[in-house]
Image: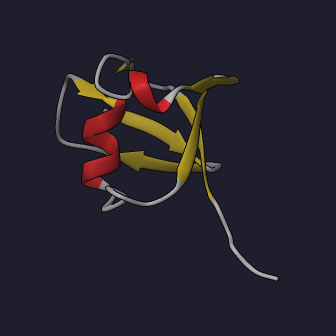
């Protein structure tokens, strides 16, 4: 599967992939992140249900603390 993540081409050896599986594959489990798929935010509660398609464009951002 070919995805565009934060503007960069990424390839994964699978045909079916959920957002949750992507989070695991990218070692982001437990991190405070937000994911946008093709211009729409994917609610964290839907990570297990949302299937990714070849060519999807994703933006993944992480929360940054400070003060």
The answer to whether residue 40 of the structure is visible from this angle is yes
Residue at screen point 51% across, 56% down: 32
Using the image, determine if residue 29 lies above or below residue 3.
below
Residue ID at (17%, 33%): 14
Quadrant of the snapshot with the N terminus:
top left
The tally of labels here is 0
- The residue under the point 34% across, 47% down is 23
Residue farthest toward the right in the current orientation of the protein:
67
Q: How is the image coloured?
A: secondary structure
Residue 54 occupies which quadrant of the picture?
top left
Quadrant in the rendering for residue 2: top left
Most foreground residue, 55 or 60 = 60
Asked if one can make out residue 54 in the rendered structure from this viewpoint, the answer is no
Quadrant including the C terminus: bottom right
- Compared across the picture, whether 56 is left or right of 30 comes to right
The x and y percentages for residue 28 are: 37, 59
- Tell me the residue at 30%/62% (across/down): 27
Q: Position of residue 13 (x, y in %)?
A: 18, 41
């Amino acid at each position: 599967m070919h995805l565009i993540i934060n503007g960069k081409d990424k390839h994964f050896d699978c045909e079916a992939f959920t957002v949750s599986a992507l989070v695991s594959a990218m070692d982001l489990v437990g991190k405070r992140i937000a994911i946008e798929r093709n211009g729409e935010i994917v609610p964290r509660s839907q990570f297990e249900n949302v299937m990714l398609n070849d060519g999807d464009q994703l933006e993944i951002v992480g929360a940054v603390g400070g003060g």
